[in-house]
Image (tube, rainbow, N blue to C red):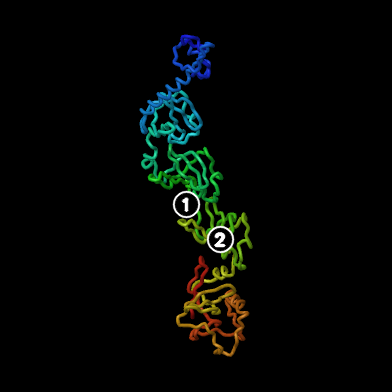
Amino acid sequence: MHVDVGVRAFLPASRSGGRDAAEMEKLVGQEILCRITKLDVDEEDVVVDRRVVTEEEALKAKGHRLAEIHEGAVVEGTVRSLADYGAFVDLGGIDGLLHVSDIAWSRIGKASDVLEVGQSLQVKVLKIDPESKRISLGLKQLQAHPWDTVATTFAVGDRVRGTVTRTVEFGAFVEIAPGVEGLVHLSEMSWSKRIHKATEVLNTGDTVDAVILGISVEERRVSLGLKQALGDPWVEAAEKIRVGSVVEGPVASLTKFGAFVQVSEGVQGLVHISEITAERRLNHPSDVLRVGEVIRAQVLEIDKEKRQLRLSMKQLVPTSLDEFLSEHREGDPVTGRVVSIENEVALVELGEGILARCVLPTPATETPTAESKTSGAIDLSVFSSMLKSKWKSGESPVSHTAQPEATSSELVRVGQVRAFSIGKIDPAEKSIELIGV
C-alpha cells in the first residue's frame, strides 16, 4: 500500500494490520496512524508500519479494560471464535475463554453444539490471571445450581429416566436432570448375572430407566439401581414358590459346598452337597452334576429377606423311609434295635435306613453288658432285614433261636431289641418319635 505522509511512503501488507485483502481495501482513503520504520533521504525511500501502532493501542486498551473487570463481575460479550474446548468471547477489547465445562450444568460435547460466532452473551468473570492476563468466563454460573432443587425434586424410590454420560471401572454415570448425575454401581445392574464391567450392559449415550436408591445432597451424590427398575424377581418368586413345591432349572455354578440352580430370572437356589443324593457321600458336586445341566429339586426353605432358596434333589428320590411313613400311623406298635444313646435319647433302627428317636424315661447307659438275662445270642448282622420284614408283614422277625425282645423293666442298652410304639410322625421332616412300652 502507498501512504501519503507528505511524501510517498510504502506500507507492507503484513504491517497494515489487516487480516486479508478485503480489510486492506477498506483502509484506502482513510487517515491512519503509523510509525516510520525506514527513512532514506538520498533514495527517497520511506517505509511505515501501522500494525505496531494498532497493537500498542490494543494493548493499552486491554490494560484499561482489564482494570475495569474484576472476578465475580457479570459482563456482556460477543462470541469471537469457537473451539472444541470452549469459546473465545470479546469483552470489548479483551478476550475471555468460556470453557466447555462452564457453558451449562449439563454435559456438553463441544462449544459449537450450543454457541455460534457473533452470538451476544452475558457471562460471569470466574478468574483473572494477573501474569498471563487470561480471563476465565462462566455461563452456567448465572443459572441456578441444579443440586439446589434435588432434595425437593427427587426422593429415594423414585423411578427416573436418564442418559448414560460415561462408564467407569466400577459402574456408569447417568444424567437424570441437567447437571445432576447418578451412579449405577456394577452390583445394581443385574439380578442374575455378575457384571464385571459396565459396558456389558450400558454404553455412553444410552437412555435408561433406573430407581433412586440413595441421595446425599451434601456430597452431591445419587445412587441408582438399574435392576430395580426391572422389578424384583424375589417378590414374584415368594408368591409362586412354596416350601415343598418342585422347581426345575439349569445348574448355574458349582462350589465345594453345593450347586446353585437358576430357578427363574434373578432367582437362584442352593442344593447343598448333602442334599444332592442319598446313595453315596460326594467329595464335590461335580461328581454327579455339570454346569448347564437341567435338574429338578424340592424347595426346603425360602428366605425372602436374605434372598436365599434352599433346595434338595434327594428328597425327590423315593426311599424305604418314604414307604415306611406311608404305611404306618401314630400309635402303631414297632420293634427296633437301639443303636446309640445320648443325653437319655435313644436312636432306634426300625429297618434298613429307618431311624427313630425315643426319649428314655429313666437314666440309661450306652455300655452293653457282657451278660445277658437270657441264654440265646442275637444275630445283629441280619437284623435289618428282619426288621424290614416285620413292618412289611406285621409278623415278628425274631425267630425262636434269636434274642427275644427286652422287657420294659430292663434298663435300655445299646444293641437291645425292644418293643416301641410310634408317638409322632412328621412326613415333612421325615422324622419319627417313639414311645417305649
Residue 232: percent from left, percent from top:
48, 49
Q: Which secondary structure, mark 1?
A: helix
Amino acid at circle 1: Val
Q: Nearer the viewer, residue 172 or 25?
A: 25
Numbered label attached to residue 94: none
For this view, does 136 lie left or right of residue 329? left
| Mark closer to the chain start, 2 or 1 | 1
Q: Is residue 422 above or below residue 147?
A: below
Q: Nearer the viewer, residue 337 or 324?
A: 337
State the residue at coordinates (39%, 38%). Answer: 146
Residue 140 visible in this rendered orientation of the protein? no
Amino acid at circle 2: Val
How many numbered markers are drawn? 2
Q: Is residue 118 above or below residue 399?
A: above
Few, some or many residues within 10 Å of mark 1 (<14, 14–19, 20+):
few
State the residue at coordinates (63%, 58%). Answer: 290
Residue 238: percent from left, percent from top:
48, 54
Q: Dot 1 corresponds to which residue?
A: 235
Q: Dot 2 corresponds to which residue?
A: 271
Few, some or many residues within 10 Å of mark 2 (<14, 14–19, 20+):
many
Residues at discs 2 and 1 in contact (Cβ within 8 Å) = no
Q: Which secondary structure, mark 2?
A: strand
Residue 199: percent from left, percent from top:
55, 44
Outermost residue toward the front? 42
Q: Nearer the viewer, residue 53 or 272?
A: 53
Q: Is residue 178 above or below residue 5?
A: below
